[in-house]
Image: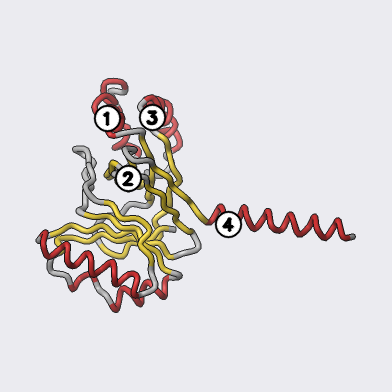
Amino acid sequence: MRILILTVYALSLLCTSITAQENVKTYTLKRGEVLDILLLSTVSNSETLFDKYKKTAFPVAFEYSYKPLPGFAIRKRVFGSASPSTFIFGKWDNKSKREGFLNNIAKRVPDFHQQRNDLFPHFELVYYEMSKDTKFSIHKDQHTVVTTLWQKDKNDFETLFSQWKKDIVQSGGKVVLQLKDGYSPIGYEYNPDVLVIAEWEDEIAFQKFKKEYPLERFTALQDIHQFVLN
């Protein structure tokens, strides 16, 4: 009986551990590696189109060191006109390989851009070269919000951004990741001055933060996009 109890206990711990791992996505990048962020929406009945895309474009991307990373559905748009349904991460060994793919993919797959247009009615891409070793985690049981900001006035923007990050912490939130100095290829431009992933305990906490510290109060902002990950 004691062995049975211990076995059940061990299995329960294992299940708890697996569930916890499923609820947390951790990303590790070394200095010099490149992080892709893609904002996508996909056409309905896309299986045939995606199968062709996967068989033609992916092998070339893998040659250039591409590694897909876990992504997220976008649950809700808070600010902005963009309407993607998916938030995708990927990484490359370095900026040279990332841009080597961009410069050569149309030579290897002549209809690459047409395939993308047919498959993804919304496709925006920004990528960042890591200036230092970076590790971050996204918890699915938290209320995770992605915010992208475009500045109108650089000096005022630096001040407001510093204050806004303090506001996040003051409200009980946490800045998970902050990115700037991104690159965005022609035709797929999405290059905000800063991209922030932050999390709160739940939607109530975020809505309270949003009400008490509205981004709209900052005149130094030219544009704001914000959405909630699922």
Residue 223 in percent (x, y) is at: 18, 60
Residue lying farthest to the right in this orientation: 1
Residue type for callout 2:
Lys
Residue type for callout 1:
Ser
Task: Give how far apart the Cα atoms at labels 3 and 2 are.
Answer: 19 Å
Residue 52 in percent (x, y) is at: 41, 29
Residue 93 in percent (x, y) is at: 36, 33
Instruction: Tell me which numbered mark, 3 or 4, is placed earlier along the sequence.
Output: 4
Q: Is residue 5 left or right of residue 181?
A: right
Find disc 3 in the rendering and name its residue: 65
Check whether the beta carbons of the residues at disc 1 and disc 3 lie within 8 A of each other. Answer: no
Instruction: Tell me which numbered mark, 2 or 4, is placed earlier along the sequence.
Output: 4
Instruction: Tell me which numbered mark, 3 or 2, is placed earlier along the sequence.
Output: 3
Q: Quadrant of the N terminus?
A: bottom right
Residue type for callout 4:
Ala
Q: Please give the label number shown on residue 20.
A: 4
Q: Please give the label number shown on residue 132.
A: 2
Disc number lying in front (3 or 2): 2
Q: Please give the label number shown on residue 22.
A: none
Find disc 1 in the rendering and name its residue: 96
Task: Give how far apart the Cα atoms at labels 3 and 4 are.
Answer: 29 Å
Check whether the beta carbons of the residues at disc 2 and disc 4 lie within 8 A of each other. Answer: no
Disc number lying in front (1 or 2): 2
Above/below status of 134 relative to 146: above
Tell me which residue sits at (31%, 21%) in the image: 108
Task: Give how far apart the Cα atoms at labels 2 and 4 are.
Answer: 28 Å
Tell me which residue sits at (44%, 56%) in the image: 138
